[in-house]
Amino acid sequence: MPKITIYLDSDFIQEVKLSGERTILGRRPNSDVVLDNMAVSGHHACLILQDQQVSLEDLGSTNGSYVNGRAVKQQPLQDGDVIEIGKFKIKFSADSGEEDEREDFQEGLTVNASLSEMPQSSPEQPTANLVGRIKVITGPAAGRELPLTKMVTTFGKPGVAVAAITRHGQNYHVHLVEGDDVPLLNGTPVGQEPRMLAQGDQITLSGTVLQFFQC
């Protein structure tokens, strides 16, 4: 399924799957994807999905829409294209392949990267190579581990609650992407404001408990 990943400056904002025929991007609250910045028009642009092809259409915006640095009115998108709207950079992925990589943590709870065993680091391994991972504590997949090698790893139940762990250098943060069933970090609710993860922290989402490690 095609998707867009939205960044403001270099900070991850959210990931959106393009399942509808039209996805409107804009500053107005009734936009399908709200881009809250004064450089963005109320209804700035639209992503059109037709026959598995996604196109970007500018909706007469004040500051224009750009694909790979070039101003466009309407443009078919290719995998990896970068859309610029105001201060937002939006990466387009034609097919993330997540369906092939996902595994259930618990009934309905999925993650957008494959589960695998994470080798232990040697004492000589430099700090710069530290990689985070999450381990399933409860549920049928208890004991399984997920290395957090991607810049963004999303997990949860689409339509119920989806959370994301983002990597910024050596630091990892967790935040809510969408849904009403908010994740808990050590028992405390986590909203859309990213919270930094520390060694041994526990994340609870939709009844599944995950523990964060870094080594």
Image: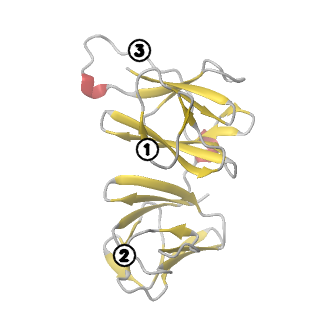
- Find residue 38 and name its label: 2
Task: Find numbered disc 3 in the image and state the secondary structure of the residue it sits on.
Answer: loop
Q: How many marks?
A: 3
- Mark with earlier residue (3, 2): 2
Residue sitting nearer the eye, 11 or 153:
11
Look at 44% across and 59% down and name the residue there.
6
Residue 2 is situated, as x and y percent measured from the top left of the image, at: 57, 60
Residue topped by disc 1: 194
In the picture, the quarter occupied by the N terminus is bottom right
Residue topped by disc 3: 120
Left or right of 48? Residue 151 is: left
Look at 37% across and 64% down and name the residue there.
89
Question: Of circles 3 and 2, which is in front?
Answer: 2
Query: From mark 1 to mark 3, how far is it between C-alphas?
Result: 27 Å
Question: Of circles 1 and 3, which is in front?
Answer: 1
Question: Is label 1 in contact with label 3 (beta carbons under 8 Å)?
Answer: no
Residue sitting nearer the eye, 97 or 7:
7
Mark 2 is on which residue type? Met
